[in-house]
Image (cartoon, rainbow, N blue to C red):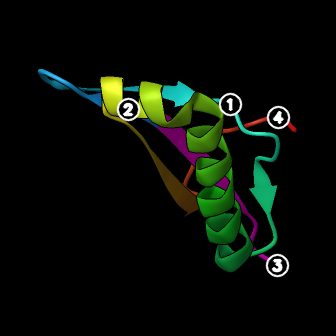
Amino acid sequence: MEKFIILMWLCTASANVQCKPIQTDRVKFNDEFDCTVYGYSHSTRLIREFGREKVNQFNLYTKFLCISEGVGPKTET
């Protein structure tokens, strides 16, 4: 069965957009559904941890990509 990996970034959209890769607790998933659900819930958790003030001040947001392990970079879990 094909496995999926998640790639995630934290971005700020101030004068220009800047994104930096961030680590996640999990990397591999059984399917795209599990990966996508994890991406949204992890994003929500991060934004809540930063809090309203920092999110608004720095225009913070997350983005993520779930890709088949066969086409993504090699990762160790």
The amino acid type, in three-letter code, at marker 3 is Met
Answer with mark 3 or mark 2, whichever residue precedes in sequence. Answer: 3
How many other residues sit within 10 Å of disc 3, few (<14), some (14-19) or many (≥20)? Answer: few
Dot placed on the residue nearer the N-terminal end, 1 or 2? 2
Residue at the disc numbered 3: 1
* CA gap, disc 1 and disc 3: 25 Å
Along the viewing direction, whichever of 42 and 34 lies nearer the viewer: 42
Q: Residue 40: horizontal and vertical position, in percent?
A: 59, 61
**Residues rendered magenta in the picture:** 1-9
What kind of residue is marked 1? Answer: Gln
Q: Nearer the viewer, mark 4 or mark 1?
A: 1
Q: Estimate the x, y position of residue 51 in percent, counting from the top left.
A: 55, 33
Mark earlier in primary sequence (4, 1): 1
Mark 2 vs 4, N-terminal side: 2
Q: CA separation, marks 4 and 3?
A: 18 Å
The answer to whether residue 67 is left or right of residue 16 is right
The dominant secondary structure in magenta is strand
